[in-house]
Amino acid sequence: MSIQVNRLADPVVRAFVTAVNAHDKDAFDGLLASGATMSDDGSDRSIAEWTDREIFSSNGHMDVESESDGGRTLIVTYRNDTWGEMRTKWRFIVDDAGQVSRFETGQA
């Protein structure tokens, strides 16, 4: 059972998931703070390279199973054309300006 994106508790995370699922790179980039960072399975990655490969050029899609930490931590069934479907955990740090300053993802 998944949570409808429009029901996600945190508005910034909701916009992030919406941008990913719409493959809207401009909206996605607009959510990131200047100098934002990310990690995948505990290793820091280049956001631009990683998101191009894992989201935008491979039709990435997030189906949210659950949320915690006020909506800043998600358990997601994530799928893309490269890896297929996998259960992942996403954790977001949102700054005072309402932008994502860091996100971390990995196997759940």
Image: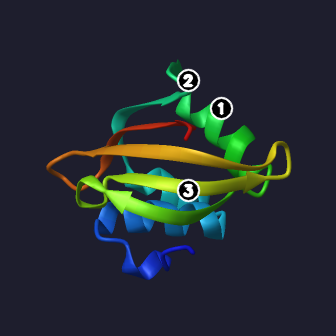
Q: Amino acid at mark 3?
A: Val
Farthest residue toward the left?
96
Identify the disc placed on residue 45.
2
Looking at the rendered image, the disc whose residue lies closer to the viewer, 1 or 3, is 3
Q: Amino acid at mark 2?
A: Arg
Identify the disc placed on residue 49.
1
- In this picture, is 70 found above or below 105? below
Identify the disc placed on residue 76.
3
Q: Dots 1 and 3: beta carbons under 8 Å?
A: no
Q: Residues within 10 Å of mark 1 (few under 14, many from 20)?
A: few
* Residue depicted at 39% across the width and 55% down the height: 31
- Which scheme is used to colour this image of the protein? rainbow
**Quarter placement of the C terminus:** top right
Farthest residue toward the front?
1
Q: Amino acid at mark 1?
A: Glu
Looking at the rendered image, the disc whose residue lies closer to the viewer, 2 or 1, is 2
Q: Secondary structure at mark 1?
A: helix
In the figure, is residue 96 to the left or right of 42? Answer: left
Q: Dots 2 and 3: beta carbons under 8 Å?
A: no
Q: Where is residue 93, by image quadrant?
A: top left
* Residue depicted at 35% across the width and 45% down the height: 92
Structural distance between the alpha carbons of marks 1 and 3? 21 Å
Q: Secondary structure at mark 2?
A: strand
Which sits in the foreground, 85 or 24?
A: 85
- In this picture, is 30 found above or below 19? above
Image coordinates of residue 77 in percent, x first then y, are 63, 57
